[in-house]
Image (cartoon, rainbow, N blue to C red):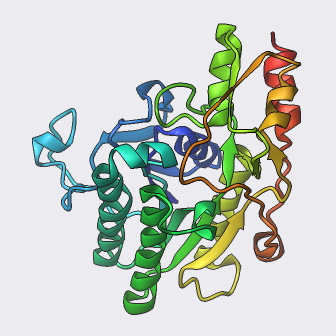
Amino acid sequence: MKFLVTGGVGFIGTNLIKRLLKDGHEVISVDNYSTGKKENEQDGCTYYNVDISNPRWWDFSTTDMCEVTCDCQIDKVDGIFHLAALARIQPSFEEPQSVYESNVTGTQNIIEWSRNNGNIPIVYAGSSSVHGDHFANPYTFTKWQGELLVELYSKVFNVPSCICRFYNVYGEHQITDGAYCAVIGIFEKQFRKGTPLTVTGDGEQRRDFTYVGDIVDGIVKSMTAMHGEIDMNYCAETFELGNGTNHSINELAEAFGGYPIEHIDERPGEMRETLNTDTKAREVLGWKPTGDVIKFIKETYILDK
């Protein structure tokens, strides 16, 4: 099959493309490279430097939308994995308009392209943050709005869709610097530089850390299901992709082998705890997360030191 991946040079997108290529699929990536890295590109995948907030993102005959002049458009694909987003809470306070354009306008444009090309099935990368206050921060608001757009197009225009809500994802190709770096990536960089691990607040915030390989498996299973393996409606069918256990930030820091820590001010707009208790993905998709974040830290950083 042929798939389009938005955000294909990002953390999760890179791992997804590796999996799709390994499974023998043809893959096209569109990404504006704002947080993803060129070195994440995989042999065998076609990459385009494109801003999906542009309503004609798919038309490469306009030279300002691609690093290289392309007299072509994307051919029809069998499915869309829509991962592209500005995906951190704290930066969304600084640049709410950019976050809205990427996460809402970009999502609208992708779904509209699906509708105009025969209702191509879409897997939308949702966020567990929508279980909290939708107005706590611009990021959560935009991911909630993205879900509503997916549901709207499914109910009104019959676009097949699944919403896969990600919890706190970690693993290979995670971002380790910049504003869009998550806690394990921050700890990784500090650990390798020999500086104290910075823990926000009291460190007792608990997060459901889910391995990126498990996330990829969940979204691939969702797409496969929409292609006929499971008889369901697929009108914004929602799956919670969380490991089902959580750990405090202090526990993560301790897993680095007693490395020095430094407490910093607590950050606004964030939930105190995330934990997936929903079993639908396991029961319907046969999804079985296997990752263990503490084991990952010890094997990746401590034993590798």
Across and down, in percent, residue 252 comes to: 81, 34
The one nearer the camera, 269 or 244, is 269
Q: Measuring 23% from the left and 55% from the top, which residue is drawn there?
A: 57
Q: Extreme bottom residue here?
A: 156
Asked whether the viewer can see residue 79, the reply is: no
Does residue 288 lie above or below 111 as drawn? Answer: above
Across and down, in percent, residue 175 comes to: 56, 31
Q: Measuring 56% from the left and 68% from the top, which residue is drawn there?
A: 133
Please state if 226 lies on the left or on the right of 55 as rendered: right
In the figure, residue 241 lies in which quadrant? Answer: bottom right
Please state if 11 lies on the left or on the right of 200 as rendered: left
Asked whether the viewer can see residue 250, the reply is: yes
Q: Measuring 54% from the left and 34% from the top, which residue is drawn there?
A: 181
Q: Measuring 18% from the left and 55% from the top, which residue is drawn there?
A: 59
The one nearer the camera, 286 or 183, is 183
Across and down, in percent, residue 132 comes to: 61, 67
Does residue 61 lie above or below 18 as drawn? Answer: below
In the figure, residue 189 lies in which quadrant? Answer: top right
Across and down, in percent, residue 227 comes to: 59, 74
Does residue 209 lie above or below 162 as drawn? Answer: above
Assign the C terminus to one quadrant of the image: top right
Across the whole image, how many numbered discs are drawn on residues?
0
Please state if 16 lies on the left or on the right of 109 as rendered: right
In the figure, residue 277 lies in which quadrant? Answer: bottom right
